[in-house]
Image (cartoon, rainbow, N blue to C red):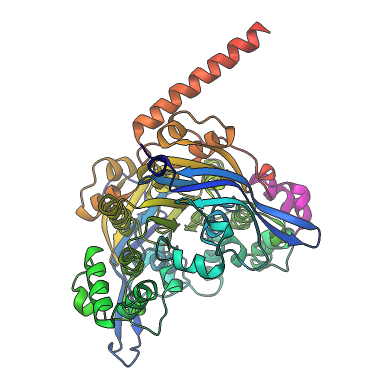
Amino acid sequence: MSDTPEPLLRARNLVKEFTVSGNGLLSRSGRLRAVDDVSLEVRTGETLALVGESGSGKSTTARLIARLIDPTSGSIEFAGQEVHALTGKALHAYRSEVQVVFQDPYSSLNPKHTVERIVTAPLRYQKRPIPGGARVYAKALMERVGLHPDHSSRFPAQFSGGQAQRIGIARALAVGPKLVIADEAVSALDVSVQAQVINLLRRLQDEEGFSCLFIAHDLAVVRQIATRVAVMNGGRIVETGERDQVFGEPRDPYTRKLLAAVPRIRPEWDAARRRNEQARRDRETKEAARR
Amino acid sequence: MSATETQALLRVRGLTVAFPTARGNVDVVKSLDFDLARGSALGIVGESGSGKSMTSLAVMGLLPKGAIRTGSIEFDGTELTALREREMQSIRGDRIAMIFQDPLSSLNPYYTVGTQIAEAYRSHRRGVTRRQARAVAIEAMERVHIRDAARRVDHYPHQFSGGMRQRVMIAMTLSMEPDLIIADEPTTALDVTVQAQILDLLAEIRADTGAGLVLITHDLAVVSEVTDHIVVMRDGGLVEQGAAERIFCDPQEAYTRMLLDAVPRIDDEIGLLRTMTAAQEDR
């Protein structure tokens, strides 16, 4: 075997088929293979980005790994255990070790619960003691994700989209997960807020050391956050590799097509902007010195 | 040069859109000025709540009920704000066409796409027979590269994919040969490979017909590729405007600089990203 340590999560030959019922006119009912022989690994402390267009099977793969649905065939091992064989206490433990952050923060947060209740819910569900009590623990969590701790008695609707997504992240962190599955977690956010949430996720991962499965369609976002990248198309992984290899020297034709399609701000414009920005700062420093 | 040649295709001055509320009027577009030169492409960019979509609806005269529009919108020498709804209808779809984010909501599920393109055409062209209009529809569908257009013309909207539906919308637009196309987030709901095809198609059509384009989007990379002139909006107001190259190379306003910093680059790890705390985010 190789020197690399056992991955935290290993999926082998995952297949998920759905029954599609015909609408009686043209199509007959049949089986749709949403995930077709997918194998992947998430290593400890890394971010594996699973990218693809709509219908590529990336979200279905994430749902299989979170055990929100069962595979048609194949296996998922988490810390050496077969995930789909877990029952009772072991399954309960898995549900705390793997946390999901969803795309739409508002629909994934109970609108009638305060932030305090929302972020401590996973601990209650796990029947674990809340360190220092709910109020103190909620405030500490909110601080970690950059929210004002005094707002712990507010409701989700009182927060902006970016802040609501931070609540979702705080809830995921409450139980100290080993794996965070982020399913298009920054896709619905405005660009300035998106940048902040990307930063937050990177910082938290440094601090807490969790692994991350990052599901996204936006390749520029993936470039910012991934350690490794797996590209999906038509239910299959067409290419997996280190981030810079996949972006810099993509091997698969579909990956190349995907990368070529991404709109880009001209690099020479960015370079000019950096020069102008530097000149502006120099001017400001000089003027400040003169005064 | 004559006056009409130098005149802008679209000239907006002091455009304000307000909604009355119990606590007085709320301005969602605040005294906006911009020009679109003939044959050029203008990008209106901003985050959610910036007023960019309200601006496009105001130009089209399609604001929601209750909205109060003031200011001047001059299109090819005609003051649009002075027109009756009937007159505006004849300009809309004929000389100014609009493409929305969600083509499915702009297409009627009960009629074939061919019928819809043909009827839109006939409503603006008197004396055109059904047969002629159908031929126009097929030709328009061919021009947006829908394969097998003669057969697909008889299909219903649900039989097309999202990208193909957007092509149908563009085909409908095209059949009218408009002078101005207003596209509000036309590719936002589409996959990136489909987005690239639709943007190419819009560029091709503009090159062929010389139509002006107003592109409303949140995506700075898209405007950088498509438009010549850019208007940056925030909270209903103008932040700055200028030639695309100037905005991207030498943004004057702190907000524009922050936006440009925040855009993730596919070729570069942003080093980065000025961090505000969440508490500073606008609520």
Residue at image x 37%, y 83%? B111
Q: Please say whether residue A136 is one of the residues in the magenta stretch.
A: yes
Q: Is residue B135 above or below residue A93?
A: below
Left or right: A235 with respect to A189? Answer: left
Residue located farthest toward the top when viewing the structure as drawn: A290
State whether residue A46 appears in this view. no
State whether residue B1 appears in this view. yes
Which one is nearer the viewer's eye here, B220 or A246?
B220
Residue at image x 53%, y 42%? B232
Which one is nearer the viewer's eye here, B87 or B232?
B87
Q: Please say whether residue B121 is one of the residues in the magenta stretch.
A: no
Which one is nearer the viewer's eye here, A116 or B98?
B98
Residue B223 x %, y %? 41, 45
User: Count the marks: how many?
Assistant: 0
Which one is nearer the viewer's eye here, A178 or B10?
B10
Question: Which stretch did the figure color magenta?
Answer: A134-154
Quadrant where the N terminus of chain B sits is top left
Residue A155 x %, y %? 73, 61
- Tell me where residue A120 sits by quadrant: bottom right
- Tell me where residue A126 sits by quadrant: bottom right
Residue located farthest toward the right when viewing the structure as drawn: B23
Residue B6 x %, y %? 40, 39
Residue at image x 68%, y 47%? A147
Left or right: A206 with respect to B150? Answer: right
Q: Is residue B145 above or below residue A151?
A: below
Q: Is residue A13 above or below residue A70?
A: above
Helix, strand or loop for the magenta stretch, by majority: helix
Residue located farthest toward the front when viewing the structure as drawn: B2
